[in-house]
């Protein structure tokens, strides 16, 4: 035999090795490689396991839901479904007036204020006195200028009728008032009481007022803008504590 070149021998061995591997990996008669079949089987097994897992999860969810569907669902705001041990809601406790607000007040005044606060927790002495002070100024200005509309809004029927009667008499005489409210020196509660559901609070006003009366020609009849006179008035304001609005009405006027 002749000698075989090394490269030819090498090529032969490689072809023989590849042929052996190729034959080992192919099934007889159908041309499908064994390793491909193995991969397909593994994929089928994995997919079957995933499907089984998903089926179990789906059954567990649907099974629990079916068990609970027969249970009644309570309404969120239905009072009949509230637990028996939950205490009913209570109204806010009214804030008692401070000692500073009632400093110097007579015992009867203090009792009256506290009874009003008990019936109307929104009642505040400081806010009430500020509002009464503003009403005092507005009412005086309306009376001096003959503004009946403003008086109607601020006064009850009796006080309004009294103011309008004085305005009518003044206009019939041809007189006008040119008064000035210089200052309000003091504002404090004079008396307070709760009459059924009506709160009545009397306020003492101490003010300096310059009074000027003129005739129809504008001639000075009496008074002076340079000479203020101290005025002491006790005005009583009332309000139904059950009313929705916060407005108080002037229902009585007296001299202090």
Image (spheres, rainbow, N blue to C red):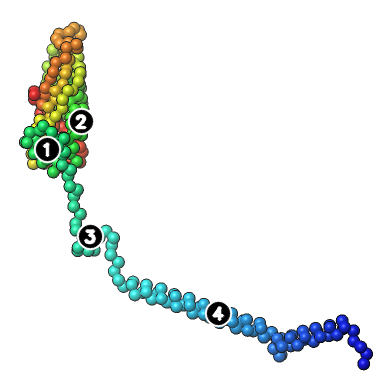
Contact (Cβ within 8 Å) of mark 2 with mark 4: no
As measured in the structure, the alpha-carbon distance from the residue carrying label 3 to the one carrying label 4 is 54 Å
Camera-near label (3 vs 1) is: 1
Q: Which mark is residue 113?
A: 1
Give the residue drawn at x 19%, y 27%.
133
Return the disc, 2 or 1, that comes first in the chain's sequence: 1
The residue indicated by pointer 4 is: 46
Contact (Cβ within 8 Å) of mark 4 with mark 1: no
Name the secondary structure under disc 1.
Answer: helix
Contact (Cβ within 8 Å) of mark 3 with mark 1: no
Q: State which quadrant residue 3 falls in.
A: bottom right
Q: Which mark is residue 171?
A: none
Name the secondary structure under disc 4.
Answer: helix
Comparing 243 with 24, the one in front is: 24
Return the disc, 4 or 1, that comes first in the chain's sequence: 4
Name the secondary structure under disc 3.
Answer: helix
Contact (Cβ within 8 Å) of mark 3 with mark 4: no
Give the residue drawn at x 15%, y 8%.
221
Q: State which quadrant residue 131 falls in.
A: top left
Q: Which percent across, then down, holds residue 182?
A: 20, 18
As measured in the structure, the alpha-carbon distance from the residue carrying label 3 to the one carrying label 1 is 37 Å
């Amino acid at each position: 035999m002749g000698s075989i070149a090394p490269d030819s021998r090498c090529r032969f061995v490689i072809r023989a090795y590849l042929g052996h591997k190729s034959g080992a990996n192919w099934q007889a008669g159908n041309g499908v490689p064994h390793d491909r079949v193995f991969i397909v089987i593994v994929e089928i097994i994995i997919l079957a396991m995933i499907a089984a897992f998903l089926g179990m999860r789906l059954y567990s969810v649907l099974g629990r839901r079916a068990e609970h569907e027969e249970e009644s669902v309570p309404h969120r705001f239905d009072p009949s479904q509230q637990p028996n041990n939950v205490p009913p809601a209570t109204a806010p406790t009214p804030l008692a007036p401070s000692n500073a607000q009632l400093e110097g007040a007579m015992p009867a005044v203090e009792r009256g204020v506290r009874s009003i606060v008990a019936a109307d927790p929104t009642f505040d002495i400081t806010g009430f006195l500020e509002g009464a002070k503003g009403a005092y100024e507005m009412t005086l200005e309306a009376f001096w200028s003959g503004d009946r509309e403003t008086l109607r809004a601020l006064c009850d029927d009796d006080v309004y009728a009294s103011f309008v009667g004085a305005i009518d008499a003044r206009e019939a005489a041809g007189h006008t008032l040119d008064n000035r409210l210089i200052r309000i020196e003091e504002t404090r509660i004079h008396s307070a009481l709760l009459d059924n559901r009506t709160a009545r609070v009397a306020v003492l006003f101490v003010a300096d007022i310059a009074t000027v009366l003129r005739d129809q020609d504008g001639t000075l009849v009496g008074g002076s803008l340079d000479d203020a006179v101290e005025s002491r008035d006790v005005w009583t304001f009332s309000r139904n504590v059950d009313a929705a609005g916060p407005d108080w009405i002037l229902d009585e006027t007296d001299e202090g």
